[in-house]
Image (spheres, grey):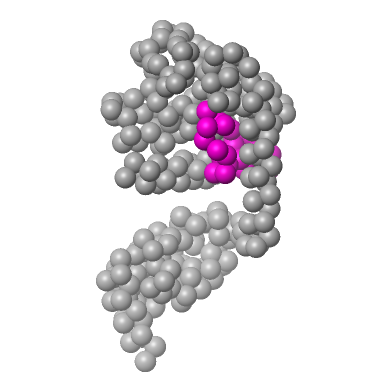
Amino acid sequence: MIIILRHFYHKDAIEFLTQSPKDIGFNRYTILNLHALLSYNLLPDPYASGRLRTFGVGIHHSVYEPLAMPQLIAELFDLILKKANDIQDPFEQVFFIMVHLPYLQPFDDVNKRVSRLVANIPFIHHNLSPLSFVDVPNDLYIQGIIGVYELNCYDLLRDVFMWAYERSSARYAALRQSLGEPDPFRFTYRDAMRDLISNIVSHGLKANEASVRIEDFAKTLPERDQQRFIEVVETELLSLHEGNSARYRIRLSDLKRWQVLWGMQHV
C-alpha cells in the first residue's frame, strides 16, 4: 500500500513542478510544497509534511548524525537554496542539490526523494531531458549518499548521477520519438477541458446545452484561443467512450446515461 501511495504522490509532485514553471525554483515555496506532496500520509506526524525538521534524526546504515538545531537547519536550508540559485550551469545546480539537501536532512523523512525530484527544476527551466532514477540500483545510490555523509566524498554519487542522466535522456528521447511532440495548446488548457467535459457529462447536458456551455467558457479565454478551444472540446466530447472516460474523471454510470442522451439527440 505504501508503494502505491508513493506512486500517486510522486505523480502529484511532478504535476506541481510542470504546471506552474514560473513559480517553481530553488525557493521555500517549491521545496516545502514538494515535500508536503511526497510525504503526504506517510509520516507519523501529519504536521511534519512541508515543514523543516525541529529535532535530531539518525541515518539508517550510517554513523552520520545530521544537525539537530532547528534554527541552524533553517539557516543552512536557506543558504543551500541561495547558493543553488547563484549557480548558472544546470547540471552543476542539479548535483549541488543532490549532495546538499540529503546531507542537511532538512525534513523528518523523505529527504532523498525530495532532492531527486527537486533536481529536475533546472532541467525544466532549460528545456532539457528530465532525470529519473528508475533504472538506478538502489544500493549504488545509497552507497553514493553514504560516501557524502561519512567521508564528504561525492565521487560515487557523481558517477551514479551521470549514469542515471544518460539512461534517462536516452529513454526520454525514444519516448518522444514514439509519441511525437505534445500539443502545447492542449497542455495549457488540459485542466479546463477536463473539468468542462466532466461537467457536461455528469450533468447530462444535451448537445445544444453543451455547445452553449462550451462557448460561454471559451469567452473567458484570450480571444486568440477561443475558437480553437471550442473545436478541441467538441472533438474530445465526440471521441469520448468507456475506454478513455477515466481521463476526465467521469463515472461509468454518468457516461452511459450521457451516451444514451446524445444517442437520442442524433436519432
Identify which residue is drawn at 36% across, 29% down.
49
User: Residue 45, image x and y in percent?
Assistant: 28, 26
Decide which of 84, 39 is in the foreground and name it: 39
Question: In this view of the protein, can residue 104 be seen by the observer?
Answer: yes
User: Residue 261, image x and y in percent?
Assistant: 31, 81
User: Residue 238, image x and y in percent?
Assistant: 46, 77
Identify which residue is drawn at 55% across, 55% down.
187
Determine the image quadrant of residue 100. Answer: top right
Question: Left or right: 47 with respect to 145?
Answer: left
Q: Is residue 115 above or below residue 149?
A: below
Q: Magenta span covers which residues?
A: 119-142
Q: Is residue 49 above or below residue 179?
A: above
Question: Left or right: 155 with respect to 203?
Answer: right
Q: Is 133 inside the magenta-drawn segment?
A: yes
Identify which residue is drawn at 42% across, 29% down.
110
Q: How many marks?
A: 0
Decide which of 216, 57 is in the foreground and name it: 57
Outermost residue toward the right in this view: 89
Q: Is residue 172 above or below residue 123?
A: below
Identify which residue is drawn at 28% across, 76% down.
257
Q: Quadrant of the C terminus?
A: bottom left
Decide which of 252, 94 is in the foreground and name it: 94
